[in-house]
Image (cartoon, rainbow, N blue to C red):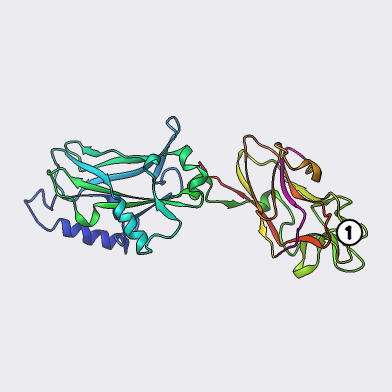
Amino acid sequence: MKQSIIFIFLLSLWACKKDADSYGIPDIYMPQALNISGGISANYPVPTGTDSSTYNYTIDAAANKLNIILGVAQASTYKPAGYTVNVTTDADTIDLLKFNNILDANTILMPELLYTLPTSVSVPAGKSEGTFFLSLDIDQLKSSDYEGKKLALAVRLKSTGQYEIASNAAVTIVIVDVDALVIGPSKDISSQYLKNTSTPFTIAGLHSGGRWGTLTDWIANTAAKSHDGYGGYATDEGGTIDMESGWGSPAIHNGKIWQTTGSALPAGTYTFDVSDLDWQGTKDPTYIVVAPGLDTIPDYGDISGNTTIHYTLFSDPKITFTLTEETKVTVGFAANYIQDQQGFKIYSVKLLNYPKHL
């Protein structure tokens, strides 16, 4: 389908035969306005590609720039004496696409301070096509202001008078998926480095009452084993990682459950994701913890303000962290239940890696 649409487009440009060797209408166009959707739209999503040889961007590490690849081409068999076209942006086009809900609510106009773009592109004699870059500042791209956003920019060609611009391929809508560039896409590596990560969890033993148990592969301290020496697991709803006090259960002070990765994680960026929570009754602050280089997690009172670890509350159950060298990592949970009737239940945990992150 994509090839047939492009072929029909090219036929429309080449319809005027000039001579036996050179034919076609020598209009200038942007290949990126056609080659992703096959002419259905002018959208040009970034990133696109599966590896460094097919990505539609390059990284200039020295300048700290991400260079999005764009281009111009002449739709005929002429070998021109060389040509120049002007390059502009068109904010009104992005506004119109947003107004008509063609671009989603998370898409915003790319700020001018974020990018640089040449004002013109020249193609030398004997060539029909050329490349230019939309360059983005990587540090700015990583700003929390753009987290979860897509940045859109309409890049338009304008004639210098030498050749006409093909009207149906004059503009490319560059749409930058910030998260996919900065920290993604993610790869689930839980099974490579952790054990017993999802329901039905395996257990080493079950309390005589039949509800509370002790997990295999995870370590629970004495405080977490608050049900006659069992704890860290409940049979509720198919089985969950659990700590609970009140409703007839003892209080839990400095209760901890943790697991150390089976082997060292390579240097890179990771997320420990505990968002698979169906029930959460925590009243006192309860922590999710990532402790690089440790074989346990700190005591509850030593977590807040500790710069050697990464931690978050159950209200925001994901921790993204970066390792600069190969390191074993311990993940876990710490609770100090002072108020009555509270606890947590976890269906699964995930360890994610971002092999393509900036």
**In the image, residue 192 lies in the stretch drawn in magenta:** no
- Horizontal relation, residue 112 to residue 180: left or right: left
- Residue drawn at (63%, 43%) of the image: 321
Circle 1 packing at 10 Å, graded few (<14), some (14-19), many (20+), is: many
Residue 177 location (% of width, % of height): 45, 51
Residue 352 location (% of width, % of height): 62, 50
The residue identified by callout 1 is 230
- Residue drawn at (79%, 41%) of the image: 302
Residue 29 location (% of width, % of height): 22, 50
The residue range painted magenta reads 279-294
Of all residues shown, which one is farthest toward the front? 339
Q: The disc labelled 1 sits on which kind of residue?
A: Tyr
Quadrant containing the N terminus is: bottom left
Answer above or below: position of 326 versus 166.
Answer: above
Residue 193 location (% of width, % of height): 69, 48
Give the camera-side residue of 129 and 182: 182
